[in-house]
Image (tube, grey):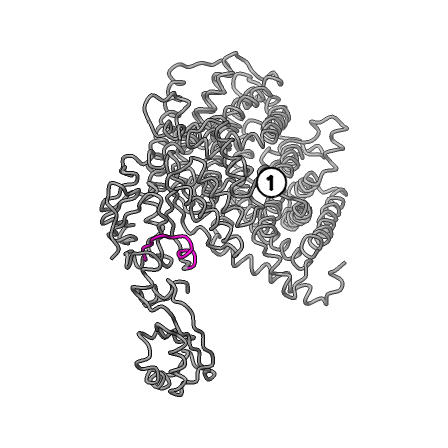
Amino acid sequence: MAAIASASSAPRLPLAAHPAFRILEHDLLVFRRRWHSYLLSGLTQPFLYLVSMGIGLGLYVNRSGGLPGGVPYLNYIAPALLVTQAMMAAAFESAWPIMSKINWEKTYLAALNTPIGATNLLAGDLMWIAFRAVLISVMFFAVILAFGAVSSPLAVLAVPVALLTALSFAAPIMAFTATQKTDQAFNMLFRFGITPLFLFSGTFFPIEKLPLFMQPLAWITPLYHGVALARGLSLGQVDAVGDLVHVAVLGAFAVAGVLAARITFRRRLEV
Amino acid sequence: MPEIPPTQDSVIHARGLTKCFGAMTAVDGVDFDVAPGEAFGFLGPNGAGKTSTMRMIGAVSPVSAGTLTVFGLDPARQGARIRARLGVVPQADTLDNELTVMENLLIYGRYFGLPWNESRRRAKELLEFVQLTDRSNDQVEPLSGGMKRRLVIARALINEPALLLLDEPTTGLDPQARHLLWDRLYRLKQRGVTLCLTTHYMDEAEQLCDRLVVMDKAKIVAEGSPRQLIEQYVTREVLELRFNRDEGEVGGIAADDSAHIDHQLDGLAERIEQLPDRLLVYTADGDATAAAAFERGLRPASILVRRSTLEDVFLRLTGRSLVE
Amino acid sequence: MLALRLSPPLALTRPTRLVARNLLVYRRGWMVVVSGFFEPLFYLFSMGFGVGSLIGAVALENGSTVPYAVFVAPALLASSAMNGAIYETSNNFFYKLKYAKLYDAVIATPMSLSDVARGEILWALMRGALYVIGFLAVVGVLGLGGLGLISSPLGILAFPAAMVVGFGFAGAGMAATTFVRKWQDFDIMQLAIMPMFLFSGTFYPISAYPPALQIFVQCTPLYRGVHLIRALTTGTPDVWIAVDVLYLITMGLIGLWIVGKRLNKLLLS
């Protein structure tokens, strides 16, 4: 009974004893079963994309001098793809797996019968998604390094930028997931949200090449800011004001997402 | 009515407890108390409000109106402290299919703040208790329904709870699995764990509960021990009569026949219930009533004399069968 | 083969009953199906016009140069035919096979397992046809607007060609799915699909590769599909398009044959 007493007496807990870490722990235990497949896809995907797009397609882009300042296409898209991959994983993880925990396997409901509360679930799974984003970014960065596709030591900052971008997607999508009864809307979200962002947020070509009316659309999407920030740092083109704006936009999406998710999680799970 | 135990000793204390979902009232002002060490049941059909009541007791669903204390604590303010001392067996299994049997328990122990090694020690003991030791490193998904249920019970016990909440614990299980489960619950009760369960099975309520409330349409319609309820609301025995009927007849007995049969049974029974396929004749002595009816010329196709059950109590109280 | 033992009319009508069942199911989720039409278009605009603006012209195999969008459009059509076929015959087929136990119920009727296989492939192709028509329609409209992406009347054959690509991958994908045991196994399938998507001369000519690699890529199915459709839309057909068609149809038929064998093993034993 001693352990139960310690769980029920709230004060003077060290940070690691916070209930949200129990959820993270759970996710990591599942991760432990699958780390090899994460490792495999985490290394092969960047490799394949960089070879195909960066080097193969890059051959043609570089030949026609398409990019301003003679930046090699590989160096141009590498940090953008890094951020995009982290974003994609975060978007996926905050949709279907969270839906399963709420609605299909209902493991959230099991957790709620313990001292853990709805906001702990949110915090725990956000930490897990952050962990995944960092893992993906670090592996991606390692591949970029192997390709020698960095122009500045600041390039390593693409990892924290990817993390922030991942959270700016994960938190709002988790908030949305908690309002859904089925996964039907996720297909729409990916088809009309995530995929177009991947294609039009300046990942593969500068947004200045977009039709004029679409450019302001790019400015308000978080991915554009993540890509622009990571690319700028990676190419060693630091623009203090612009970069702060990027961070602020990403941060705003993440914070707004967390605040919304706190409400939708409680509304969905504490009824 | 059976006396309600004094409040300060109650593990659960509810007065005017109400739960609304929008305009729908799922639980409508119910009063009950559960004493320490007691096995207490909520009996009722689907949609009667049992699960909503259990979720409020489990401090996962806010109370809409009325008062509720669990271990003397307020679920709204001290939910986490209540849940720390509760074991919950929900209707759905809610197991993590990506983890093994053992890992499911380990993680759950961690949710309660147990250190890893303590969690592991208890998990081993509990797997022994629910007879799943040989499956401890297996995946959860291929387990049978009965095994999953036992695993969920083991999971609910990882924090050594003083109160175990079980929502429809044996729904969907085969008879053998049910009996094994009942046996484990009976042992827990002997160890002094307070049990609080919902069921729509009469035999389950009779097997497990010291005391129960019958719920129907969001309200408590009766309260007492299974024996008290039977004594109070029905006779000791029931005579079940079936009649041959013509093709095409929907009910068991045609309308003019029905009046005739009623006349033949007049004065022989305390009460008669007409079900679609048979007639239930409530009487203290089934055999004697059957003989008397036979003397009056009644010729049913089959006769069965049995003891009254909670099913009959429910029929009496609500006019409906429990499992349709 | 099982198919030969059936009288012709039944062999044709029975698979369509499964299609009818799928249509009924998708009536509720039609938005998901219809929206699939947008994905290749998004790629077309992003790669064709966005990246295309960085590249300008690209040389075809016969040496003539075309704008990048003209080069990449047929490849996106082929990839989309592949992806559509794979999507329907992997996740969806696996779900029906393993979880919904749909076919256990179907084979209790006069329908045979090869009816099941052919019905599902027919369904995958119908869904694919929807996307191909949509894609070609948009390309046609762009052509009217002066952004001609199809430079030959042969381009009209891109539709049947895309169906052939879809058939090849539907058969192969379904055959692969019968070997899948759990969802994670699809990761391995993706490990074959993604490199094909990226390296089959989709986004740039394979002349960028060393000769040995070029020969290897030429032996992969998506390359054949891309080659076939590109030859038609750019009006540069060569004898190799006969190989393309033969290759893809053979792949589909072998896939179907494997599916028949595997379903017998999975459902009847």
**Mark 1 residue crowding within 10 angstroms, few (<14) / some (14–19) / many (20+):** few
Q: Nearer the viewer, residue C234 or A177?
A: A177
Question: Vertically, is A170 above or below C268?
Answer: above
Question: Vertically, is B13 above or below B256?
Answer: above
Q: Nearer the viewer, residue C201 or A144?
A: A144
Magenta-drawn segment: B203-214
In screen coordinates, is B99 left or right of C227?
Answer: left
In screen coordinates, is B94 left or right of C6?
Answer: left
Question: Vertically, is B312 above or below B191?
Answer: below
Q: Is residue B98 magenta?
A: no
Q: Which residue is mark 1?
A: B134
Question: Vertically, is A217 above or below C251?
Answer: above
What chain letter is assigned to the residue under label 1? B
The reply to whether residue B153 is in sight is: yes
Point out residue A202 in the picture as x, y percentages from the top left corner: 48, 27
Point out residue C90 in the picture as x, y percentages from the top left corner: 61, 46
Quarter placement of the N terminus of chain B: bottom left
